Image (cartoon, rainbow, N blue to C red):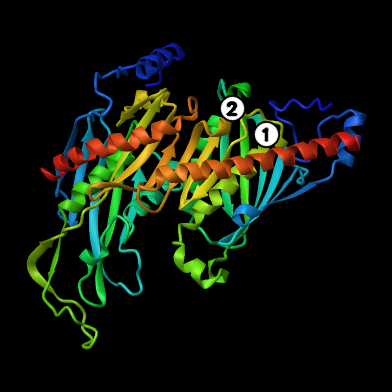
Amino acid sequence: MNVQDRRRLLGPAAAKPMAFSNAIIDEQQKKPVNMPSKDSENGDELSLHTGFIENCNGSALVEARNLRHQTSLITAVYGPRSIRGSFTSQGTISIQLKNGLLEKYNTNELKEVSGFLMGIFNSVVNLSRYPKSGIDIFVYLTYDKNLQSEAPAGESQSKKTFSEISYLIPHCITSITLALADAGIEIVDMAGAGEANGTVVSFIKNGEEIVGVWKDEGNNEDLLESVDDCKEQYRRYRDLMISCLLEQKSLDTSSS
Amino acid sequence: MSLSVAEKSYLYDSLASTPSVRTDGRLPHQFRPIEIFTDFLPSSNGSSRIIASDGSECIVSIKSKVVDHSVENELLQVDVDIAGQRDDALIVETITSLLNKVLKSGGGIDSSKLQLTRKYSFKIFVDVLVISSYSHPVSLISFAIYSALNSTYLPKLISAFDDLEVEELPTFHDYDMVKLEINPPLVFILAIVGNNILLDPAANESGVANNGLIITWSNGKITSPIRSVALNDSNVKGFKPQLLKQGLAMVEKYASDVVRSLENL
């Protein structure tokens, strides 16, 4: 059992929380879980890993590839940790999205996406459980490539190219949800999102509630159709996330 | 002015009731009164100043430059400055990025209207200064940009249109100006409170809203970007998919009235 009080200042960065001996054994036996999952229907390949960064509270790696894009994201969650200043009755979330080695996206576009993600996770995380605390989420874009040129000629001509950042957003949401679950932070439901025709819609509660809508290209005629396509995709991603977390849980219990 | 927990709860219940009761007695689709002044900056090609009834105020200045359009792809550039906010603040960068997408060439703006000759075009710089704002300022800024672009006059070209054969720079008339005829998009902001949708939320309504929607309107129809936006940190929740449809329908119904009143300035 970990007796660290996360709402207090913890001293120097290298300080380790006090832990009982069985917790130390757990820590040693805990290994990163590799959960490659294929979704062959759509040509989507998704690989989910959690808990592989040691010095943060929760982490996730999402690698995705389909006919159009290939991307890889690392998310680290720090917190809940105490914030200085006056008392706040509920926690605050900050999300930072960073370009990796490739300086592909503008900073203001990335900030716009991180603001959008903060809006989503403000409604997903049960913030009233974390008074006077801050939860810091860092999403690092390690790899992102447009595969459109490699697709067959007919394919690339028939499909319109949409803003690439909208392809990235569902994977950011998957990755942050997994990292929050890995950190043990209370969320109201597994948030996920799907992308169709450049529209991204994020859902909770089995698609009964929308927590985020993002559309950069096109008119609204296809928006309502896209919502249904996104819902399908959200359900697939959510099932993969749940099986990944259950797999990790069973590995953890079997190792202890 | 921040509200107490009890006041917020009272306000939320009245806004979420059917029909919704807004503190200032407006209907769900009704805007607050706004005042707009145009063409008041002598050194810019076009300008406007917009003042909302709650004291929110925004100034927009339009400047132009002649560029080679084979080199410069984007012929409209928006720069936003909000008083009291750093240039790298989340709200400033988000609004800048959103407005640049709204006014992107080929999407909301017909770039052929900015073309001077076969080689050169005007590049329009839109500088926005938000002097004070109490609720989300994007809708107010977009109205100001709309009226500023509609009051923009650019120098009249007197040299030949076909300049690919003869290497010459565009030459302009000494006094005559031509009105810029582009139809800029408008951005509407809606608040979702319970199962109700409210257009143009005031500061207190934004403070209790469950979610918000940003919807763009251009040339008589809804267009992208469309976004959901959290209007506060404390009260954000998911919303039912039907509300998205209702929000789009509300904008579709009333946006043309707003366009008409802005055109009649």
Q: Position of residue A178 (x, y in %)?
A: 67, 40
Secondary element type, mark 1:
strand
Q: Are marks 2 and 1 on the same chain?
A: yes
Task: Please say if A99 is above or below A24.
Answer: below
Labels 2 & 1 near each other (Cβ < 8 A): yes
The image shows residue A21, relative to residue A157, as above or below, that is above
Q: Amino acid at mark 2?
A: Gly
Q: x, y (%) of residue B91?
A: 42, 41
Mark 1 crowdedness (10 Å alpha carbons): few <14, some 14-19, many ≥20: many
| Image x and y of residue B176, in percent | 7, 66
Task: Quarter of the image for the N terminus of chain B: give it.
Answer: top left
Residue B14 vertical position relative to residue B104 in the rendered view, above or below: above
Chain letter, disc 2 residue: A
The tag earlier along the polypeptide, 2 or 1, is 1
Instruction: Tell me where residue B141 sits by quadrant.
Output: top left
Q: Is residue B253 left or right of residue A84?
A: left
